[in-house]
Image (spheres, rainbow, N blue to C red):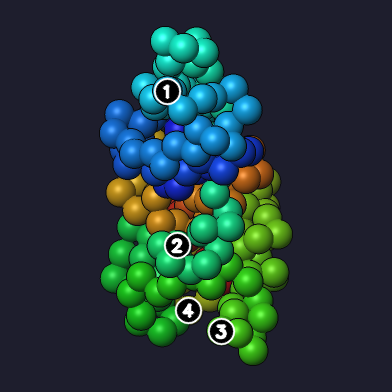
Amino acid sequence: MALLPGTYRTAAGSIVTVLTLNARSWSAEFDWFEEPDACCDCRCADVDWQERSLVWECEVCGGGMAKLIPNVEHAQMGETMQCPASMCPLIAKDGSPWTGEYAATCPGHDDMARGGCPWWSMSCSTGGIQGQVEEAAARGGRHVVAGPNKVRRLAGCTSRAFDCAKAAECRWQEQAILAGRSTCPPRDALLRGLDPRVTLF
């Protein structure tokens, strides 16, 4: 599974920012004091994308490594994550089909008193968007989508992968990774030969 751009952390609290696919470029805030297999002489050496781990080297203690997990706490503060329905190149390249807003911040919660979004628990964090892809695939590409978001192409489209430049700030991509999938629902739909707009309403 590819290591996508985004913010990750180790269990001990080191933060890694992956800037490009499979960590060809990355930066780290290495917390040697908290990492159980590290000492003050350790230095970050690599991000092993296949092992999804931060690797450090040390002539004193021999170095070590720690698994990376998506830094959900950071993402849910809404500092970097965006609503894909307002910026996804496959379904909303010109902004939200409903509001026209482009690259709206995703709050990562549904507490309306604190600026939350009602779609968070109805769809985005509960697998509802991916469920629409599964339903469309089971129905030969057909899905009930209304208005300006209407699906125009049924099954039989050319299946292809899509390298998304917005993956690092996409909330659906983040949720896909947390669920053990490698791609967000619109890209998964395209890979199956479906119109990515089956993810809309």
The front one of 141 and 50 is 50
Please report contact status of discs 1 and 3: CB closer than 8 Å, yes or no.
no
Task: Give the mark, 1 or 3, whose residue is nearer the N terminus.
Answer: 1
Report x, y in % for residue 136.
Answer: 61, 52
**Residue appearing at x 51%, y 25% in the figure:** 39
Mark 2 and mark 1: span between their CA atoms? 35 Å
Q: Earlier in the sequence, mark 2 or mark 4?
A: 2
- Image depth: mark 2 or mark 4 in front: 2
The type of residue carrying mark 3 is: Gly
Q: Nearer the viewer, mark 4 or mark 1?
A: 1
Check disc 3 and report the residue beneath it.
115
Q: Nearer the viewer, mark 4 or mark 3?
A: 3
Q: Position of residue 138 (x, y in %)?
A: 67, 46
Q: Earlier in the sequence, mark 4 or mark 3?
A: 3
Q: Report the mark closest to the observer, 1 or 3.
A: 1
**To which residue does mark 4 refer?**
147
Relative to 89, does residue 38 appear above or below in the rendering? Answer: above
Amino acid type at image mark 1? Asp
The percent position of residue 82, horizontal first and vertical second, equals 43, 65
From this view, report whether residue 58 is shown above or below residue 9: above
Do the numbered discs 4 and 3 sit on residues whose CB atoms are within 8 Å?
no
At mark 2, the secondary structure is loop
Image depth: mark 2 or mark 1 in front: 1
The circle on residue 81 is 2
Q: Secondary structure at mark 1?
A: loop
For the question of whether residue 138 can be seen, the reply is yes
**Residue type at mark 4?**
Gly
The residue that disc 1 covers is: 41
Q: CA distance from mark 4 to mark 3?
A: 27 Å
Q: Give the CA distance from mark 1 to mark 3.
A: 44 Å
Measured in 3D between alpha carbons, the distance from the residue under mark 4 to the one under mark 1, in whole angstroms, is 60 Å
| Position in image of residue 95 (x %, y %) | 34, 73
